[in-house]
Image (cartoon, grey):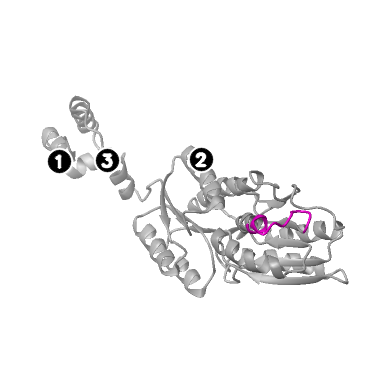
Amino acid sequence: MVNINDIAKQAGVAKSTVSRYLNNGSVSEDTRRKIEKIIKETGYKPNAFARSLKAQKTNMLGVIIPRLNSASTNEVLQGIDETARKLGYQLIITNSDQNNEREFENLQTLAKQKVEGIIMFAREMTEDHINTVKSVETPVLFIGQKAEGIHSMVHQDYEAGTKIGKYALELGHRHFLYVGVPETDQAVGVERRQGFIDRVTAVTGTTIERVETDFSRTAAYTKGLTFLKETEATYIVCATDNIAVAVLKAANELNYSIPGDFSLSGFGGYEATAYVSPTITTVSYPYRQMGIEAVNKLRQLIEKEEVPLITDLQNNLVVNESTAPFK
């Protein structure tokens, strides 16, 4: 395989001269014609990646995801991949497996690999996360969580909670169970829940029970087999659609009728909510659109354009079969 040294020898010039030619540097017209002729005859193809490194432009973006088995992450990735290809970027995708140390390591590794920008699916925001981002010179965009002084793209989680609360109250329900996740996740674990609680408790005579699980269906299903037998709630709100699907499975095994015995809803708008019976009422989030906008925002940061620190995306209530008026 012909390399740059071979081209330099045949042209009778220094390797640095060939390098200047390949990078559109200053080369005499005679030398340019000579190098062009040899390249054409030998079929030499320059290493585009190596050239881009020298030019400090790799056309590569890094993406850090929290886990591999997430429906919402996959939808966002579709938008990221589609838009990155249109803009001429290649992606390097790393998985942190919900581990802080791996997130820090992935941030630093991607920066060393000279990616032009990094999109990080943020889970929890600690001081170490913020300091690590600020220690790398690469532009970073958080999605899903916001942090002071770092460009972030988030969903309107608090507003989503109020939408479910308003809807449940309009159906006449006054006794609720909220199945949440740990508060380390600010958006899902705190803001969704608080939006729901604030809206519901604004009405007198309401009660709210609370149960905490994690993001896995298995854990939610197992807990559901217990708390469903103990609750007096007529409306159960789950922090994610995955949890809602797991609670529905537990309810079916316990021979409860939904929405006959209680109404059930989640958050996310996952495809799975439309393929269970009854279909599940949810708040639909624009995950694919988030991926598209994330790449466009990151490109603006790379090109040093002015970008708002926080970009938030709206969501929509989707009423399905799992909710009904209180009787």
Q: Which residue is mark 1?
A: 5
Disc 2 on helix, strand or loop? helix
Q: Earlier in the sequence, mark 3 or mark 1?
A: 1
**Region rendered in magenta:** 250-261
Q: Earlier in the sequence, mark 2 or mark 3?
A: 3
Q: Earlier in the sequence, mark 1 or mark 2?
A: 1
Q: Residues within 10 Å of mark 1 (few under 14, many from 20)?
A: some
Q: Nearer the viewer, residue 81 or 233?
A: 233
Q: Is residue 244 left or right of residue 6?
A: right
Q: Quadrant of residue 167?
A: bottom right
Q: Residue at x 41, y 69 (%)?
A: 101
93 vs 213: above or below: above
Q: CA distance from mark 2 to mark 3?
A: 25 Å
Name the mark on residue 47: 3
Q: Amino acid at mark 1?
A: Asn
Label 3 close to label 1 by CB (< 8 Å): no
